[in-house]
Image (cartoon, helix red, strand yellow):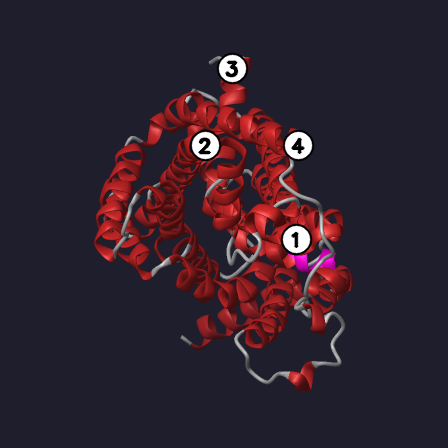
Amino acid sequence: MNQKLKITDIIALGFMLFAFFLGAGNIIFPPLAGQMAGDHVLLTMSGFLITAVGLPLLCIIAIAVAGGGWEKLTSDLPKKSATFMAVLFFIIIGPAFAAPRTGLVAYEMGVKPFIANPEQLQLTLFSIVFFLVAMFFAWYQGKLLDVIGKVLTPVLFLGLIVLSVMVFLYPQGEILPAQAHYLTRPMTTGFLDGYNTMDTFGALMFGALVIEALRSKGITEKKVVTKYVIGAAFIAAAGLAFVYISLFYLGATSNEVAAGADNGGTVLTLYVQALFGTEGQFVLSTIVLIACLTTAIGLISSCAEYFSTLTSLTYKQWVVITGAACALVANVGLNQLITLSVPVLFALYPVAIAIVLLTFIRGRLPNRKAAYRNVVIVSLVFALIDAAKVVGMDVSIFSFLPLFDYGMAWIPPTLAMIIAMFFIPKKIEVIEEKVSTNLNEIKAESL
């Protein structure tokens, strides 16, 4: 069997992955962060790129190295615990936060500016239509590579290139001094801002879709699959970095046209209007609608694929359930949804990062099961402290922890536990097996 792809198919695979990632959060967060960062934009952007580009790239590579999706990544964790975490991740990127956010941003930036007196009814109707279209494309799972990689994404990328070139050629203002935390700790603030894209969660799930797309092309050998998945990951990462750098610069030079904006969507809208006039809003609307739609398709498809493996319901039935739930949640409103998502991201992002890091050192760990369990528990416990702080709970008792003030108290203990796991002897597993064998023998003799 032919185990090679044409160059156009490889590029399409990378574009498909790029399109899955590039959605609501990727568009609305960098402009505001860039505006707030001001003359510290480079440091802020560097921190943002670590969590918004570097971590998703590592996740996809980890999936390729592990030879599969979430099940392979967590094979050394107790099955029930791994499944529970996966369900949480899929709910976050599916009907709870990320997927509904795509519909909300598409409405706020792609439709609402053209409505004279927008009301809740328009949002409701748009949500229904938007997620019906997303469900339609997700329905034909095996066609995702052709539909998204070869049709939708090139249009999206062309629009982004036009916008990016214009931003650098005709900046709409001077870069001003940094504000708030961007002044005192720009890099760590950018690092935490990158959480909002939710792309690390998405990467853990999108990897399975990339593998499925390869299989639909007849690529089944593990080494070949790994090579193409990693290649697609780098194409997607390069595209994301290009977009983020452009949007950060856009934000940093937006003070004359978007001063006082309370979200990145407003910054981007006002900037585009200043660059292109009223007609520019149609260009922006097209970019946003396609970006959000492709991400919604990927999220619905990945959720349906996973939940169909846990239940008796089929993939297509889960497409309908997930899409309907997304349309319902989207009516909550963009600001409320973002506010609700922040503590959840602070609590679970470190766990996802820990699992990815363990994947790359798995072969060198003397006691894999002990390592995975201990590291995941430690990352979760300390991440919950950061999450509690975000929601306003008094956790000052933990202020002695390194990086506590930066919202990253989980990093030192997690890294320390990973290092400690290299010194946990493998004999523990042997002793456990011997004890279990002896107990079985005693039971057999007693009978």
Circle 4: element type: helix
Can residue 425 be seen from the camera position used here? no
Q: Which amino acid lies under the numbered mark 3 shown in the image of this protein? A: Thr
Question: Cβ–Cβ below 8 Å for labels 1 and 3?
Answer: no
For the C terminus, the quadrant is bottom left
Mark 2 vs mark 4: which is more N-terminal? 4
Calculate the distance from the C-alpha at mark 3 to the C-alpha at mark 2: 31 Å
Circle 2 is placed at which residue position?
A: 280
Q: Say which of marks 4 and 1 sits in front.
A: 4
- Estimate the x, y position of residue 314 in percent, counting from the top left: 24, 43
Residue under the image location 43 percent in, 38 percent down = 288
Q: Say which of marks 3 and 2 sits in front.
A: 2
Note whether 442 is above or below 331 in the view shown. Answer: below
Calculate the distance from the C-alpha at mark 2 to the C-alpha at mark 4: 16 Å
Mark 4 vs mark 1: which is more N-terminal? 4
Dot 1, how many residues are within 10 Å of its Cα: few (below 14), some (14-19), or many (20+)?
many
- Estimate the x, y position of residue 35 in percent, counting from the top left: 63, 51
Q: Which amino acid lies under the numbered mark 2 shown in the image of this protein? A: Gly
Circle 1: element type: helix
Circle 3 is placed at which residue position?
A: 8
Circle 3: element type: helix
Circle 1 is placed at which residue position?
A: 358
Calculate the distance from the C-alpha at mark 4 to the C-alpha at mark 1: 40 Å
- Estimate the x, y position of residue 228 in percent, counting from the top left: 57, 26
